[in-house]
Amino acid sequence: MLNKLNPWKSQNQPSSLSDRISQIKSQEVPAHIAIIMDGNGRWAKKRSLPRVAGHHEGMKVVRKITRLANKLGVKTLTLYAFSTENWKRPKMEVDFLMKLPEEFLGTFLPELVEENVRVTMIGHKEKLPAHTLKAIEKAMESTKDNTGLVLNFALNYGSRVEIIEAVKQVLNDVDDGKLDRERIDEETFSSYLMTSGFQDPDLLIRTSGEIRLSNFMLWQLAYTEFFFTDVLWPDFNEEHFVEAVEVFQGRQRRYGGV
Ligand code: FPP
């Protein structure tokens, strides 16, 4: 049967994962993939576990997907790990989420260094607990010369605030005579965003069946291909990621042209 959302699924798939990976690498691989990792709470609830157990399981998936993205030759992987709205969650859950970067990097930093991965972050650093920031900054420092995949954590990130801050900075620079208002174009404005220096995502993946952006990279996703799946993030595996890239490769991007 034809699968309208994912037509690639309707075609014959090579059998093994390694065949599919080789096939992907022979075509254009999305340079920047962004992921909204959703469904941790529901994964835990289904197992009568506390919500944080879902986040912990989700952290393990981050490792798997990072390794695979690097292997595929993806240049940047941006992961929405904590939004500016997530502070509304119960304190215990927020505290747990804020400890995950430390746990993840405490365990996997040597592996990331060895695999030539560079760790970066977008989001407001000010409100992060000192221990969270310390872990991220240590990882950024130890991997700054790496030339492989850029693993970019969106932590305390919210796109509307990002855009408002950029507008304010643009106005300041115009007032100070550093920027000519007539020369403000898309490229100039992009350089005021937290993603300055990154190219826009080619592919956005959101897990758990929710079909929305939740204040994530609203400017940067203007021409991005979207892949939504019902799979909950802790269940998301290499096959699912490969499928998302295959679907991307089966799409035609026209950027408003014909
Ligand atoms: C949304 O699921 C998920 C989050 C708010 C947190 C995502 C964080 C991780 C997957 C771990 C990050 C790992 C590192 C290394 C920073 P939800 O809790 O909203 O799920 P629900 O919609 O089912 O309740």
Image: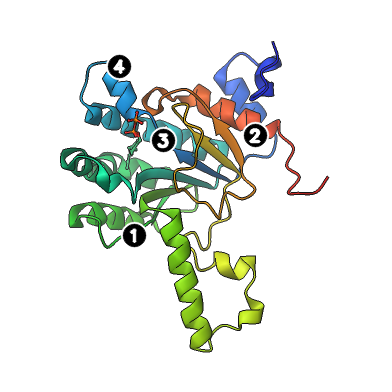
Please give the residue where the numbered disc 2 appears in the rendered image.
Answer: 248
Q: Residue furthest left?
A: 92
Q: Position of residue 172 (x, y in %)?
A: 46, 81
Query: Which one is nearer the viewer's eye here, 249 or 72?
Result: 249
Q: CA separation, marks 1 and 2?
A: 31 Å
Q: Is residue 83 left or right of residue 149?
A: left
Q: Residue at x 40, y 59 (%)?
A: 144
Please give the residue where the numbered disc 4 appears in the rendered image.
Answer: 46
Q: Is residue 185 left or right of residue 75?
A: right
Q: Quadrant of ligand 1?
A: top left
Q: CA separation, marks 3 and 2?
A: 18 Å
Q: Amino acid at mark 1?
A: His
The residue at label 3 has a CB less than 8 Å from ligand 1 = yes
In front: mark 3 or mark 2? Answer: 3
Q: 10 Å neighbourhood of mark 3: few (<14), some, or many (≥20)?
A: many
Query: Which one is nearer the viewer's eye here, 24 or 196?
Result: 196
Tell me the SS state at disc 3.
loop
The residue at label 1 has a CB less than 8 Å from ligand 1 = no
Q: Position of residue 31 (x, y in %)?
A: 59, 46
Q: Amino acid at mark 4?
A: Lys
In front: mark 4 or mark 2? Answer: 4
Please give the residue where the numbered disc 3 appears in the rendered image.
Answer: 37
The mark that comes first in sequence, 3 or 2, is 3
Q: Is residue 152 left or right of residue 255?
A: left
Q: Residue at x 40, y 22 (%)?
A: 235
Q: CA separation, marks 4 and 3?
A: 17 Å
